[in-house]
Image (cartoon, helix red, strand yellow):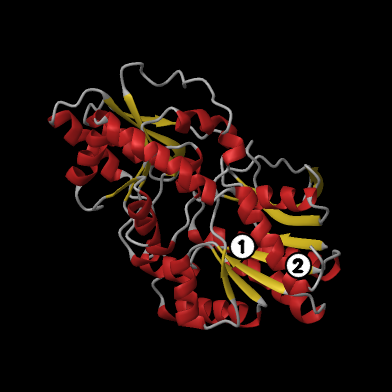
Amino acid sequence: MKILYFYQYFSTPKGAWGTRAYEFARRWVDAGHKVTVVTSVYDKSDLKPEGMLTTLDVDGIEVRIINVKLSNKHNPLFRAWTFLIYAIIASWYALFLPADIVVASSGPITVGLPGLIARFLRRRPFVFEVRDLFSEGLEQMGLVKNRWTLKSIRFTESIFYRFSDVVVALSPSMAEWIVRDYNPKRVEVIPNAADNELFAKKLKVPEAFGSEKKAFVFTGTIGTANNCEQLIDAAVVLNERGISDVDIYLVGDGKEKADLQEKANQLGLQNIHFVSLMPKEELVAWLQHARASLLILQDIPVFETVSPNKFFDSLAAGLPVIQTTQGWIKDVIEENRCGFTVDSQRSDSLVNHIITLAQDEDVYEQMSMNAADLGKKYDRSLLSQQYIELLTEVTGHES
């Protein structure tokens, strides 16, 4: 089967970004399928194009790179322009590249355009993969306030949902939201996954970790969505309580990082550290030797539906999670006792659970084992197989 996969943020473990598309695609290739990924150049990816249009072989995956650079640091209008340019060029690929089925992975929502073109002009089955609720996020985070702009975005979303053969949502609550608002013909849930294979080998303790300290690690984008200022507040409360054996690490980059670093310096905080972006394969050691991971997001309804890579990386590392979302991940954590959900408006709630995991060995050990067990249920290979079975069913091919 020939699979044509449109996704703007493709990266391998050598990059500092999620690897869902890469990990699924390489497994499909190993199973005998031909996979072509059409992507652009995200600043956290490891791709290095040589011209405007570059073709690479990445572990058997044919990767077509459109040299349009993306960054969360770009202003909204420039980002919208890069999304549109990608969608236009990708639509040409949708017309001419070999394909038995087309997968378009959003966001941004514009990635659905080449999928729709392949659907109508080539009669190819179209799978619309939804990584986040695009228009809901824009509205709730205040990024788009003009109601007519929001209406046009939602209308575009409705077309992609309506004319896709299958919508793949990354969480159960995301699927419920899509069904309620758009009622597409079919919705399946295939969440992000635990890369147990990547985390299987135990690596050395990072030099940055103090031998007498417990490390609590936040990874990812340090931007508006994440509200990482509450980690500064937590560091202050830890100092006020005289907790000296806990260090908080923010590993990543984003437009709020510099301001947070300056605030930490002004407060004279020695228990919070900012670490540069690193490849995912290097991040493994940081999670393996941390005490817990910190999943911090704004308190808005759309984040109840998210399926963050960092949550599943934590499970693969056997790492308890302290997180702020109030949706399906909260339920999963409570059911499996592999971490804590805290009130994002109360730094003392976050601090209380940090102290518990830092000082109570029994709680830490049990939650660590529970996290590792849960990671096996979300293993990348299992979900890859589930996905390819869905694609073969839609095309009518034999798996």
The relative height of residue 23 versus residue 206 in the rendered view (above or below) is: below
- Residue 342 lies, in percent from the top left, at 26, 50
Query: Who's the residue at 22% across and 34% down the image?
Result: 355
Depicted 159 relative to depicted 366: above or below: below
Label disc, if present, on residue 215 of the rendered structure: none
Q: Please identify, in this view, whether the residue under mark 1 or under mark 2 is nearer the observer.
A: 2
Instruction: Identify the mark at residue 392; answer none if there is no mark.
Output: 2
Q: Determine whether the residue tagged by mark 2 lies in a helix, strand or loop.
A: helix
CA distance separating discs 1 and 2? 29 Å
Q: Earlier in the sequence, mark 1 or mark 2?
A: 1
* Label 1: few (<14), some (14–19) or many (≥20) C-alpha neighbours in 10 Å: many
Disc number for residue 83: 1
Q: Residue 216: x and y, percent?
A: 35, 33
Among the 4 quarters of the image, the one containing residue 275: top left
| Residue 232 rendering spot, x and y as whole percentages | 26, 38
SS at mark 1? helix
For the N terminus, the quadrant is bottom right
How many discs mark residues in the rendered view?
2
Viewer-side residue, 90 vs 120: 120
Q: Identity of the amino acid at label 2?
A: Thr
Considering the image in quadrants, where does the C terminus appear?
bottom right
Could you tell me which residue is drawn at 55 percent across and 50 percent down?
193
Under mark 1, the amino acid is Phe
Q: Residues within 10 Å of mark 2 (few under 14, many from 20)?
A: some
Residue 214 vertical placement versus 319 (above, below): above
Residue 243 visible: yes
13 left or right of 152? Answer: right
Residue 62 is situated, as x and y percent measured from the top left of the image, at 80, 50
The residue lying at 54 percent from left, 51 percent from top is 378
In the displayed structure, does residue 340 sit left or right of residue 111?
Answer: left
